[in-house]
Amino acid sequence: MERIRFGETDLEVSRVVLGTWVTGGWAWGGADEREAVGAILRALELGINFIDTAPVYGFGKSEELVGRALKEWGGSNGVVIATKCGLEWDDAQRVIRRNATPERIRFEVDQSLRRLGVDRIDLYQIHWPDPETPFADSMAALVDLREAGKIRWIGLSNFSPPQIDECRRHGPVHGLQPPFNIFERDAEKEILPYCAENRIGTLVYGGLCRGLLTGKFTGTETFPKGDLRQMDPKFKPDRFRQYVKAVDAMKKLAAAHGRTMAQFALRWALQQPGVTTVIAGARTAAQAEENAGISGWALSPDDLEKVDQILATYIKNPVGPEFMAPGRR
């Protein structure tokens, strides 16, 4: 398993990060708890030592399952745990809002430590920028938590370079988590170059674009109530077919390497400038094994050029992941 130093931290992490949004079940049509724990354990066995989670993933469930897996593993020694703060939800778990006030952050970190069963969180990230709370206040809370020994390093998720700059005026920023995949590439314009220049480690998420880049869709599928893809404009009929045609063309490039389409897509992301690590979710042990298979090989410059040609040929009206942004208070 390829390892890399994460930005300017002392963390030596696998370049594949186990993402656990799907572990919590929320927005993905549910999840089997035993299978989810098995996926985490298999990822650890394969050398994936970096796990990313968040309280909102299943409203605490994802963190609890990560904690259960760590207990079965024998503890968190050698495992790098990243989680997040700054989102709250109503009692019905239907309305999610940004809240990165110091009070909320202090409350959340203790809840996450309890659910994860650890004494300290390696990378603690504000999940979304909260325009109602001064960044200075949020950063002051994170700096205090670091000084108290509850977190080791400070990260941000879904922040723009100007927003990161403002945060850095009030404390260190060690990691950034932006959306990035073959179909959603806005981060390559400013965010990834900014992070490379400032030696900020990155965990890019959405590498399979909600499953589009797995190659398993025909363009005619529908999704059940509560599934995130019901709201994603990429899965509306006209666009859906465009994206499926592009994936079908890329499958030939993946097959030339003896890899699955998912492995090809994640490897593509891993090789882009400014990308430190790539987050890949897994519902099952088999999916964790497939994710681990993106390590130890590389796409050629010709492969990368052909990907761009395929996008230009098939994707006529691209859209990004903006629909995922939670509401403001």
Image (cartoon, grey):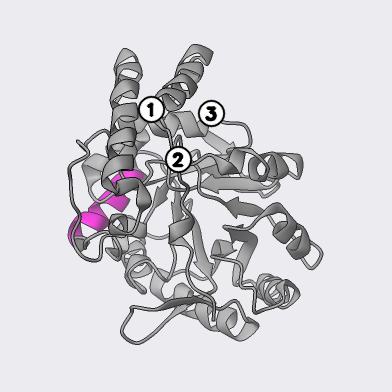
Q: Secondary structure at mark 1?
A: helix
Give the dominant element type of the magenta stretch: helix, strand or loop. helix
Please tell me whether residue 57 is drawn above or below residue 79 in the rendered image: below
Magenta residues (range): 34-43
Residue at the image position 36 percent from the left and 56 percent from the top: 20
Using the image, tell me which numbered label, if any, was put on residue 271: 3
Question: Which circle, 3 or 2, is nearer the viewer?
Answer: 2
Q: Quarter of the image containing the N terminus? A: top left
Please tell me whether residue 114 is drawn above or below residue 272 in the rendered image: below
> Disc 1 or 3, which lies upstream in sequence?
3
Instruction: Give the amino acid at mark 1.
Output: Tyr
> Disc 3 or 2, which lies upstream in sequence?
3
Give the x, y percent position of residue 196. Answer: 70, 39
Give the x, y percent position of residue 121. Answer: 54, 65
- Do residues under tags 1 and 3 come within 8 Å of each other at their CB atoms? no
Residue at the image position 46 percent from the left and 73 percent from the top: 112
Q: Reply yes or no: does residue 167 show up in magenta.
A: no
Give the residue pinned by disc 2: 318
Q: Residue furthest right?
A: 169
Between 39 and 94, the one lying in front of the other is 94
Give the residue pinned by disc 1: 314
Residue at the image position 31 percent from the left and 65 percent from the top: 65
Please tell me whether residue 144 is drawn above or below residue 192 in the rendered image: below
Q: Quadrant of residue 247?
A: top left
Q: Estimate the spatial distance between the alpha carbons at disc 2 and disc 1, rounded to whole Å.
A: 10 Å
Instruction: Give the amino acid at mark 3.
Output: Gln
Judge left or right: residue 208 versus residue 320.
Answer: left
Q: Quadrant of residue 69?
A: bottom left
Between 283 and 228, the one lying in front of the other is 228
Instruction: Give the amino acid at mark 2.
Output: Pro
Q: Estimate the spatial distance between the alpha carbons at disc 3 and disc 2, rounded to whole Å.
A: 22 Å
Q: Secondary structure at mark 2?
A: loop
